[in-house]
Amino acid sequence: MTQHSDSGDEYIPSTEDDRVAERLAELTEEEAEARAEALRAGLEDYELEDDDAALLNLEAGEEDYEPFVPAPPVLAIVGRPNVGKSTLVNRIIRSKQAVVEDVPGVTRDRVSYDAEWNGKDFTLVDTGGWEQDAKGLHRRVADQAELAVDEADAVVFVVDGLVGATAVDEAVVKMLRRKKKPVLLAANKIDDSAQMAEVYALWNLGLGEPFPVSALHGTGTGDLLDAAVKAMPETAQHGGLVPLGGPRRVALVGRPNVGKSSLLNKLAGSDRVVVDNIAGTTRDPVDELVELGGEQWRFVDTAGIRRRQHMASGSEYYAMLRTQRALDKAEVAVVLLSVEEAISEQDVRIIQMALDSGRAIVLAYNKWDLLDEERRFYLEREIERDLGHISWAPRVNVSARTGWHKDKLAPALETSLENWEQRIPTGRLNAFLGELVAAHPHPVRGGKQPRILFATQPSTRPPRFVLFTTGFLDPGYRRFITRRLRETFDFTGTPIEVSMRVREKRKRKK
């Protein structure tokens, strides 16, 4: 993705020339387009490959207008620990996204997923196990489950069908009655008809007919979902409006205990995520709609990356995969770094993950309000040394604890996303390269000087440029072009990719 990994230093021009942008500004769009057409026509003298034609004929698509629509209804899955809630969630969303491990309490936060059944879209919320007399971290998990019920439009209450109703289950029922929400009772782990006798006793909970299901094998889940869809309203009662394409998606990444959950809580204005000073409390990515800068954003609070992937095991391994998936689903990554500690190899690795996934990037430095002058001096040098390759990413100094400077996050996100989607007109791009190469030609190598024949930008998100050339451009010269592209067209906050297609002149027929 990034050019800094190539060997060799960046090409340094022998003469300083600041008139490239000036000459570019003097060109009209018509003149630039005419130049580009002449260069494109010149490509016909070269041996082009089949996919070159498709690349050269790409035109920028019109942006679609995205009207606002009501948010889909919310279905919360609750129950005491280890009754199979996350397995049921995976069954409903037809994907192994929820952390499942044979250890009670692996799911600690509310975790939401997009789901669909028989043409009806809804948001599915998985929760940590609810326990009435929980203390410490478990108490906060129980609070989260109760909050999920408050914001849900309907609830699936999962019990272990083989164990029957326990005292904790009865306490959950009391909590659910207080909430006055539609509740469906799911008796999980019922794999065959011989076990049905266990289910009948659950009528005594007073929640109506129990649905016997096997989350593991999928039996009975269709009937449960049919009933759930009937119980839910058409749209979310607490969700408000979302753009048709959905709010812009932000992955919040960083090493464990760097303050991701605290920052998300401060942005959301509520204790949305379990925060504990045990490193790595968050294991599932947690989605949260956040109002920021007058807009809605969908934040994903991702599991802290603790070890290299091949060293991670169990739920940590899956959580790391989901961190990658969160980046894949996001449009922009906020990489949170703690200014109290030296920038680590792990920080650099997380940034590289975000770069490799091609996302727009914002760097957020947490605990900035606690920074003293001496640490600031060393921090700036660490940033220069270790993060020089992403000096183009906007920096926001924040305090997750107090919310200091959180208002600066939205403008940084908007800048990065705008540039991530930026398309340079083909005429302007070729005019820029023509002026740049005229002022600073590629060094002669072995008696030859490679030329840039034509350039195009086939895609955005992130911006990708393809140069048709007569020979390989030195990595250092490519880096020079990339830097000048950034400076001239302002690609703050986004990686950009510059690749080459070396084409030879057609052999004239004798």
Image (cartoon, helix red, strand yellow):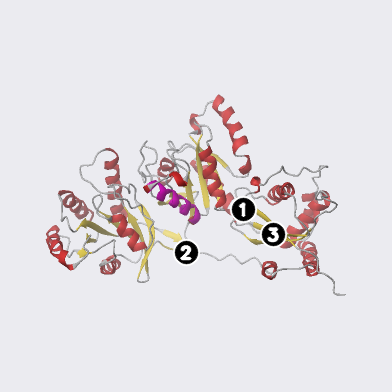
Q: Residue 419: which disc?
A: 1
Q: Quadrant of residue 374?
A: top right
The circle drawn on residue 244 is: 2
Q: Which type of secondary structure does the marked residue at label 1 adopt?
A: helix
Give, as a three-letter code, the residue at label 2. Answer: Leu
Q: CA distance from mark 2 to mark 3?
A: 32 Å
Chain part drawn in magenta: 315-328
Question: Quick one: which residue is furthest to the right in this view?
Answer: 510
Q: Amino acid at mark 1?
A: Asn
Residue 84 screen position, x and y as percent? 27, 55
Crowd rating for badge 1 (residues with CA inside 10 Å; few <14, some 14–19, many 20+): many
**Prevalent SS, magenta region:** helix
At x 18%, y 63%, the residue is 210
2 vs 3, front mark: 3
Q: Indicate the amino acid at tag 3.
A: Val
- What SS does tag 2 mark? loop
From the image, tell me which residue sits under label 3.
Answer: 466
- Residue 506 spot, x, y in % from top left: 80, 69
Q: Residue furthest bottom?
A: 510
Quarter of the image with the C terminus in it? bottom right
Where's residue 364, x and y in %?
52, 41
